[in-house]
Amino acid sequence: MSIADNINKQIVESMKARNEDRLRALRGIKAAFLLAATETGNREVSDEIALKTIQKLAKQRKDSIEIFSKQNRQDLVDKETTELKVLEEFLPQPLSEAEILSVLKELISATGASGMQDLGKIMPQAMAKMSGKADGATISKLLKQLLSA
């Protein structure tokens, strides 16, 4: 079952269960899928595009939570946190720092990188290899540590 079909199924289940918070989050995902589909000109959203869309929505929720926390708006933090939990159900398990370091060391040895000047060579490869499984900021931080050592 595709991610989009799973979302539609979950929407129906949430309606039946009268779970308004979950339903709101799922409808937001579906709306984002429709926008992504119109951008590509397709009627269906592939799982790859769906995953990228959900990742984008999750990042937006994390940013919103941070902003609302600074503004002492606990009601909005709670709302965004609830939606983030629903989004995370559809994302693959993120890699641990140890797993990220392992992949980065592999890429460094494969490319023969020796210092910070090679950051631009390795970063795109690392992002492609760990797409959806690791945050770009974490990858960048760990890669800089490895290259500067």
Image: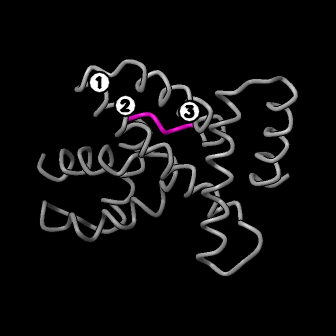
| Residue 95 covered by magenta stretch | yes
**Foreground of the two, 45 or 115:** 45
Q: Earlier in the sequence, mark 3 or mark 2?
A: 2
Label annotation for residue 83: 3
Q: Please report the residue visible at 61 percent of the width from the left and 47 percent of the height from the top.
A: 28
Q: Quadrant of residue 18?
A: top right
What's the residue type where badge 3 is placed? Glu
Q: Reply above or below: 120 against 69.
A: below
Could you tell me residue 87's position as x and y percent?
A: 59, 38
What's the residue type where badge 1 is placed? Ser
Q: Disc 3 versus disc 2: distance between alpha carbons? A: 11 Å
Q: Earlier in the sequence, mark 1 or mark 3?
A: 1
Dot 1 lies on which element?
Answer: helix
Q: Please report the residue visible at 37 percent of the width from the left and 31 percent of the height from the top.
A: 65
Q: Reply above or below: 122 against 131.
A: below
**Foreground of the two, 85 or 80:** 80
The magenta segment is 93-97
Label annotation for residue 106: none
In this rendering, would 139 be left or right of 92? left
Could you tell me residue 59's position as x and y percent?
A: 42, 45
Q: Are marks 1 and 2 in contact (CB under 8 Å)?
A: yes
Q: Disc 1 versus disc 3: distance between alpha carbons? A: 16 Å
Instruction: Identify residue for label 1.
Output: 69
Q: Quadrant of residue 120?
A: bottom left
What's the residue type where badge 2 is placed? Ile
**Foreground of the two, 72 or 126:** 72
Could you tell me residue 36's position as x and y percent?
A: 60, 67
Instruction: Identify residue for label 2.
Output: 65
Q: Disc 1 versus disc 2: distance between alpha carbons? A: 6 Å
| Residue 143 covered by magenta stretch | no
Give the prevailing secondary structure in the magenta stretch: loop
Crowding at dot 2, Cα within 10 Å, few <14 / some 14-19 / many 20+, comes out as many
